[in-house]
Image (spheres, coloured by chain):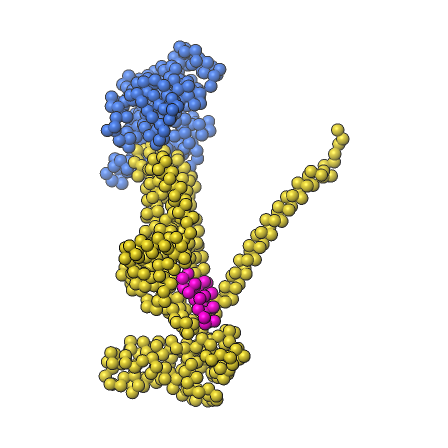
Chain colours: A blue, B yellow
Amino acid sequence: MKDQRLETRVDTQTIKIEARKAQVYYGTNHAIKDVDVDILDKTVTAFIGPSGCGKSTFLRCLNRMNDTIPSCRVEGRITLEGEDIYDPRVDPVQLRARIGMVFQKPNPFPKSIYDNVAYGPKIHGLTRNKAELDEVVESCLRKAALWNEVKDRLAAPGTGLSGGQQQRLCIARAIATSPEVLLMDEPCSALDPIATAQVEELIDELRSQFSVVIVTHSMQQAARVSQRTAFFHLGNLVEFGETGQIFTNPRDPRTESYISGRIG
Amino acid sequence: MTRVSLFAQDARTKSRNAAEKRFRAYGLSAIVVALLALVWLLVSIFGNGLPAFRQTFISFPVTLDAAVLDKAGNRNVAEMAKTTTIGYAKLLATSLEAELAAKGIDLGEVKSKDLTKMISEESPATLRNRVLADPSLIGQTVQVSVLASGRIDGYYKGRVSMESAAKDKNTSPEQLALADQMQSAGVLSMQLNPGFLTMPDASDKRPEAAGLGVAIIGSLYMMVVVLVLALPIGVAASVYLEEFAPKNKFTDLIEVNIANLAAVPSIVYGILGLAIFINFAGLPQSAPIVGGLVLTLMTLPRIIIPTRAALKAVPPSIRDAALGVGASRLQTVTHHVLPLAMPGILTGTIIGLAQALGETAPLLLIGMVAFVRDFPGAPPEGLFDPAAALPVQIYNWTQRGDPGFVERASGAIIVLLVFLIAMNAIAIYFRRKFERRW
């Protein structure tokens, strides 16, 4: 297991998602205040912070999953490649095909492993025939480092896999629609250390094709997998910068307190 | 502090243990009482009702005399129809008399007229229909198996005794004695009676001929109407309320009203149906379509409530997963939520249908209580023909004077119970079959 990889450098400066003065309200509760974040292409960005600081809320704003919560209201400007994702002309369904998501608890559909991965390409009409679909399923399962374990039982139910395998299946499902950005909401919190290591390794490989945003409770994880880190506290973005700098030389005293374990 | 032995119970422990024992005794006695009541019910229903599935038949050859049945001799059905059931009754009596003479049974006190009375009044009509349907039978001698009259049948089912027959103007001890002789000669016997399930209702005087045929078809038609209307409407309403509708005061109001509608006494739906479907829409009375519509109204809330519960029970993580890969809300519902909720929906639907099947009160108000002897036609037109319904038929039979209808009513209850148990078994089967873990 590669432990601290603080030396990893950011490879690109292309901005995929740009948030400016983003505000989120739950009813009257102001959950996210004035957040400015740039998510770079082919980069792993980690959101860290104590529980209830709003990092998951903000993550779910990026592909409009918060739309399903009636009391939730988003203000400010969040753009994907310059286009405002909260523009009334945007259909969240199309948006979510381009910004995939992996959830905290592995949530495979109670269908076969094959159908889990094939579902996204099917509903978006990404493949023309069965052979192409088979290819997509195989390549996604390979990318998710799951192919060798499940290639003989693609018809078996996805819910029958172990926790770590289920989460990798969910990652395969998320990348099957060829998204540009992959959002991961504490993807390892329900996994044991071995499964966590596998998923972390996978995230690092995914970086070559996608931009990855990961919310994590574990600072070690953020340090291991990410190139850029954002620290949230009480709904504010306290500090955002290169992971190495955040962990070795934080500018804000709150960041320093958190990463050294004094708050949180 | 003094040391207390663990082996000795203190006063508090004793009283707590006693309270627990009392509580268990209450619970156990409640269950025992309930079970006893159930056993009593089943024993009395089956004891009374099973005889309805067997009937006394008299079998003998009948010579279908052309001189009586086809006076013109041209086998023209329209002209043959002029011979009424009275003619056929005489024919049956003559043939029976001849058969008894051939078997060496002395009629004794029993006159020819009384012999006719031992045969069900229904039998001449049955024979007449048979002949009119197949005129080539005329001139032949055919073996017939006709229903014995209700009193003779009652004698073999323990309802009628020599003493009661002496006071009864519908039968006499001599007839019963003759019946015994006929039984030993093999002319009269107790047989399985499929007619109980296939024949239509019969008049007050002919309990032996009364069957559930029309009632079963009427109930079946109504269940089809309920299933076809209530399942899609109920599921669509539930899905809309649960997955799409905004949560506000208006939807809260709808929700409260659905819960209240499920508790509205069913006779109220009967009045509603009478006012809307018959008086306003002008649909015919006694028709399965109206019964089905009324029962649909009654069943809808009973389907919506369990369907919504089943939809609520689908974990939100499944919805997140589907939305997360870019499924629309409708796709999320149809591809993932509905299949997972299906066992609950089907169970709710079948139990709702079973309740509707046993419902009597609303059907009384829309005229299903009428005496219907003609089978309704094939659907869809048949849905507008008059028909009976199983529970109403039971109610009807319990109102009748002839003691022969007591076993009919109990027998019909057995049939209804069998249908209900079958439907519940289907519900359990579906629940097991579609149950998945996630």
Report which quarter residue A165 is drawn in: top left
**Residue in front for this viewpoint, A29 or A69:** A29
Q: Position of residue A127 (x, y in %)?
A: 25, 37
Q: Magenta residues: mostly which secondary structure?
A: helix
Residue B34: say if magenta.
no
Report which quarter residue B390 is drawn in: bottom left
Is residue A3 among the parts visible in the rendering?
Answer: no
Q: Residue at coordinates 43% horizontally, 84% vertically from top-left? A: B114
Q: Residue at coordinates 51% horizontally, 81% vertically from top-left? A: B166
Q: Residue at coordinates 38% horizontally, 24% vertically from top-left? A: A28
Q: How many marks?
A: 0
Report which quarter residue A37 is drawn in: top left
Looking at the rendering, in which quadrant would you find the C terminus of chain B? top left
Magenta residues, start to end: B391-415
Is residue B109 among the parts visible in the rendering?
Answer: yes
Q: Residue at coordinates 38% horizontally, 51% vertically from top-left? A: B298
Q: Position of residue A67 (x, y in %)?
A: 33, 30
Q: Position of residue B318 (x, y in %)?
A: 38, 36
Residue B411: say if magenta.
yes
